[in-house]
Image (tube, rainbow, N blue to C red):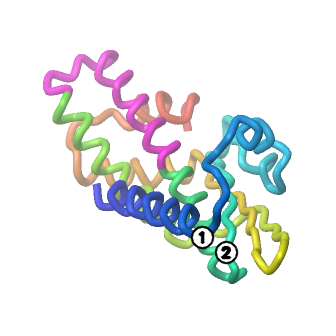
């Protein structure tokens, strides 16, 4: 839950900084459809083995632009992982006939936040590019983490915090194959 709050705070702060730092409009259809042609966008697409995310940010300071882009990419990555974990939890509930569904989902969400917080703490970009226009720098970054790494961290925390979870079955629902 702590990570979820931090992610929301980062997104909110980044959106305020970005919206206050220029006179451009919020995302338009053109920007949304053009996002796949941005630098690092091709390296920010998740697949069966990796969770990936990409982001960009603009600032008059190149370091700040990079920090904002990294925060946004990590936030997107964390959200994608949480969504996948919660989907796996909901399937697990059905397959294993869990009696207290709400408590189970809440516990899984707490555990996933812990695992993501640990996993994303020291993550580095797999792609990092910059551009400069009129003294404003735009940083483009993509980050990734293997599904197996997240599964291993989840497994370790779930085994300690939530009793009676069949981690082999949960891992299959989360990763898509026995690991």
Q: Which quadrant, please, contains the N terminus?
A: bottom left
- Main secondary-structure element of the magenta-colored stretch: helix
Q: Which quadrant, please, contains the C terminus?
A: top right
The reply to whether the C-beta atoms of the residues labelled 1 and 2 are less than 8 Å apart is yes
Looking at marks 1 and 2 on the same chain, the residue that comes earlier in the sequence is marked by 1
168 is within the stretch colored magenta: no
**What's the distance in space between the residues labelled 1 and 2, CA to CA?**
8 Å
Front one among 69 and 145: 69
Please provide the residue range marked out in magenta.
79-101
Q: Which mark is residue 59?
A: 2
Q: Quadrant location of residue 97?
A: top left
In the displayed structure, 168 sits above or below 137; it is: above
The residue indicated by pointer 1 is 21
Q: Quadrant location of residue 117?
A: bottom left
> Residue 43, percent across and down?
78, 50
Front one among 57 and 111: 57
């Amino acid at each position: 839950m702590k990570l979820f709050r931090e992610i929301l705070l980062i997104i909110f702060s980044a959106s305020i900084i970005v919206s206050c730092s220029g006179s451009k409009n919020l995302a338009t259809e053109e920007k949304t459809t053009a996002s796949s042609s941005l630098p690092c966008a091709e390296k920010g697409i998740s697949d069966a083995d990796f969770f990936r995310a990409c982001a960009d940010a603009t600032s008059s300071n190149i370091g700040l632009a990079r920090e904002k882009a990294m925060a946004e990419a990590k936030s997107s990555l964390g959200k994608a992982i949480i969504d996948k974990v919660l989907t796996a939890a909901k399937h697990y509930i059905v397959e294993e006939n869990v009696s207290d569904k709400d408590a189970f989902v809440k516990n899984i969400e707490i555990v996933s936040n812990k695992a993501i917080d640990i996993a994303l703490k020291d993550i580095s970009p797999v792609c990092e590019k910059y551009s400069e226009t009129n003294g404003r720098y735009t940083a483009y970054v993509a980050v990734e983490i293997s599904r197996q790494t997240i599964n291993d961290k989840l497994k370790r925390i779930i085994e300690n915090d939530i009793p009676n979870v069949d981690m082999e079955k949960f891992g299959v629902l989360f990763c898509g194959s026995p690991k």
